């Protein structure tokens, strides 16, 4: 484990739609409900699971809960939030051991943050996961200096 995560408030697996969903509370300067969802997607004719994350908010349009991945909470607990989000990978790969997780930030700044977090924690991530990225129309092994359109994570066969 990279660090100490927040406890999950819920963990739900929707078998019909193949969606794994988690909620937890970010407890920094404020208490903010957060959500994580692994959702099947297809990109470049390949099946992945998108790893969505953000604030859990009520949609003004539908009145239903949604994950808002564009809000910048700046709640002062980014490390613990990161540890919590990363800790869901273990549960996900327990259900889908051969799957590939797709990570794409809602903007370039977020992709830089994700890349930086992977770089800083590489020695803890690399033994368990294969990290690749999509750059210049090709999927290549993760390297800190490469800008990626999206990142792909697979569990290593140990």
Image (cartoon, rainbow, N blue to C red):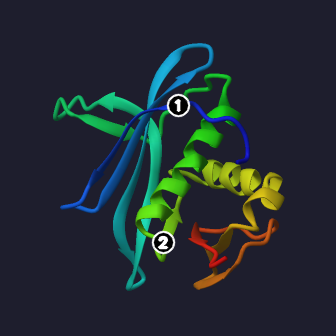
User: Which quadrant would residue 79 be assigned to in this image?
Assistant: top right
Residue occupying the point 35% across, 69% down: 41
Residue occupying the point 38% across, 32% down: 56
On the image, the x and y values in percent for residue 136 come to 63, 81
In the displayed structure image, the side of residue 49 where residue 141 appears, left or right: right
Disc sitting over residue 97 in the figure: 2
* Residue, far front: 158
On the image, the x and y values in percent for residue 2 come to 73, 46
| Element type where label 2 sits in the image | loop
Mark 2 or mark 1, which is nearer the start of the sequence?
Answer: 1
Q: Is residue 39 above or below residue 133?
A: above
On the image, the x and y values in percent for residue 60 come to 23, 28
Q: Give the alpha-carbon distance from disc 1 to disc 2, as whole Å.
A: 23 Å
| Element type where label 1 sits in the image | loop
Q: How many marks?
A: 2
Q: In the image shown, does 133 or 49 lie closer to the viewer?
A: 49
Residue occupying the point 46% across, 31% down: 24
Disc sitting over residue 113 in the figure: none
């Amino acid at each position: 484990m990279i660090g100490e995560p927040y406890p999950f408030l819920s963990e739900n697996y929707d078998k019909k739609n193949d969606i794994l969903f988690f909620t937890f509370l970010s407890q920094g300067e404020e208490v903010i409900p957060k959500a994580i969802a692994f959702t099947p997607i297809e990109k470049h004719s390949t099946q992945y699971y998108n790893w969505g994350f953000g604030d859990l908010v009520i949609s003004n349009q539908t009145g239903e809960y949604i994950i808002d991945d564009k809000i910048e909470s700046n709640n002062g607990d980014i490390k613990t939030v990161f540890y919590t989000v990363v800790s869901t990978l273990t549960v996900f790969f327990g259900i889908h051991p051969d799957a590939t997780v797709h990570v794409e930030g809602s903007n370039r700044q977020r992709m830089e943050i994700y890349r930086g977090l992977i770089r800083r924690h590489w020695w803890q991530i690399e033994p368990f996961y294969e990290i690749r990225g999509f750059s210049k129309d090709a999927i290549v092994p993760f390297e800190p200096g490469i800008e990626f359109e999206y990142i792909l994570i697979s569990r290593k066969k140990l």
